[in-house]
Image (cartoon, rainbow, N blue to C red):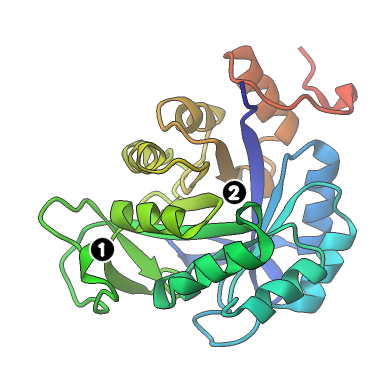
């Protein structure tokens, strides 16, 4: 059985790690290089670095900072934010990333997913999906009518760091990017993000059942039980978390021990001294 992964997330704004609630009210959570090194040493399975304002501000990702983070890591490293071309992706891989995350650029140019998968391999291409339960209001016209919201839609895709609704049905969209060659889906519920009340299990499970590729659940972890629920009820292959790790509520070792005790296969810690006592 494949092991489930625990992945801390560094949401970076102006060179600092931040965390908010439903993509708003950001507060400082520390230095990205120091946090990355700590999570690597604690036994995290992977790390995700997202420059959360790059797309909205129409600028390139903070490449120098990506390089500094990559230098302290010995675990797989995913980088996203403001990547709009094959050249941008190549720069991040050369800077030390193992994978890249595409979100806004994938919606605006779905062909980029296919081109990137052909150039670098599907294993390098993660498509991030920020989804919110369907609400009325102005929307960006859907670029593909076959993917547009309809009466059965439950979740809508947002872009530009959660600032713009797209008119895309989330389940239709994840199926499409899987067909285009994405190797993984990074799924964030905007409704539960930062609230620490648990992941959107209905959304997570629906997406996991809709695609043949791994799904990383994101948005809402507040207790270790929430990680367990996302991996079992939600059928996710991995859980992404920020607040519970950044602010010291739990350690990676605690999360792994908790999951292992409940029968969830996880990669064992290389340093047994990190295991919680008792």
Q: Nearer the viewer, residue 161 or 46?
A: 46
Q: Nearer the viewer, mark 1 or mark 2?
A: 1
Residue that numbered label 2 is attached to = 243
State left or right for residue 68 relative to residue 264: right
Q: Residue at x 34, y 58 (%)?
A: 173
x and y percent of residue 195 in the render? 44, 48
For label 2, count other residues whose C-alpha is less than 10 Å away and answer few (under 14), some (14-19) or many (20+): many
The residue positioned farthest toward the left in the image shown: 151
The disc label shown at residue 202, or none:
none
Q: Nearer the viewer, residue 63 or 9?
A: 63
Residue that numbered label 1 is attached to = 147
State left or right for residue 270 relative to residue 25: right
State whether residue 54 appears in this view: yes
State left or right for residue 55 relative to residue 71: left
* Separation of marks 1 and 2 at Cα, in angstroms: 33 Å
Above/below status of 41 relative to 24: above
x and y percent of residue 236 in the render? 49, 36
Q: Quadrant of residue 67?
A: bottom right
x and y percent of residue 147 in the render? 25, 63
Which is more N-terminal, label 2 or label 1? Answer: 1
Q: Residue at x 54, y 49 (%)?
A: 184
For label 1, count other residues whose C-alpha is less than 10 Å away and answer few (under 14), some (14-19) or many (20+): some
Contact? badges 1 and 2 (CB < 8 Å): no
Could you tell me which secondary element the residue under label 1 belongs to?
helix
Q: Residue at x 29, y 55 (%)?
A: 172
Q: In the rendered view of the protein, which quadrant contains the C terminus? A: top right
Q: Nearer the viewer, residue 161 or 144?
A: 144
State whether residue 31 appears in this view: no
Could you tell me which secondary element the residue under label 2 belongs to?
helix
Q: In the rendered view of the protein, which quadrant contains the N terminus? A: top right
């Amino acid at each position: 059985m494949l092991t489930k992964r625990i992945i801390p997330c560094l949401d970076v704004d102006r060179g600092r790690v931040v965390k908010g609630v439903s993509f708003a009210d950001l507060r400082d959570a520390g230095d990205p290089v120091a946090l990355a090194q700590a999570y690597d040493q604690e036994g995290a399975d992977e790390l995700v670095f997202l420059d959360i304002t790059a797309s909205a501000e129409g600028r390139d990702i903070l490449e120098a900072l990506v390089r500094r983070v990559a230098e302290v890591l010995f675990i797989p490293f995913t980088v996203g934010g403001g990547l709009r071309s094959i050249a941008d992706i190549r720069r991040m891989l050369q800077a030390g990333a193992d994978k890249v995350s595409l979100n806004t650029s994938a919606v605006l140019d779905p062909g980029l997913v296919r081109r990137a998968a052909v150039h670098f391999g599907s294993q390098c291409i993660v498509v991030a999906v920020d989804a919110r339960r369907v609400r009325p209001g102005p929307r960006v016209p859907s670029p593909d009518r076959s993917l547009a919201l309809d009466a059965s839609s439950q979740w809508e895709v947002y872009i530009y760091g959660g600032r713009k609704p797209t008119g895309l049905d989330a389940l239709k969209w994840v199926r499409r990017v899987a067909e285009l060659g994405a190797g993984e889906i990074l799924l964030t519920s905007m409704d539960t993000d930062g609230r620490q009340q648990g992941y959107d299990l209905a959304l997570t499970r629906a997406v996991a059942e809709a695609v043949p590729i791994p799904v990383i659940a994101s948005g809402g972890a507040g207790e270790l039980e929430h990680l367990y629920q996302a991996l079992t009820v939600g059928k996710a292959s991995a859980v992404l978390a920020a607040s519970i790790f950044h602010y010291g509520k739990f350690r990676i070792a605690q999360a792994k021990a908790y999951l292992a005790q409940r029968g969830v296969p996880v990669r064992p810690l290389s340093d047994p001294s990190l295991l919680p006592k008792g």
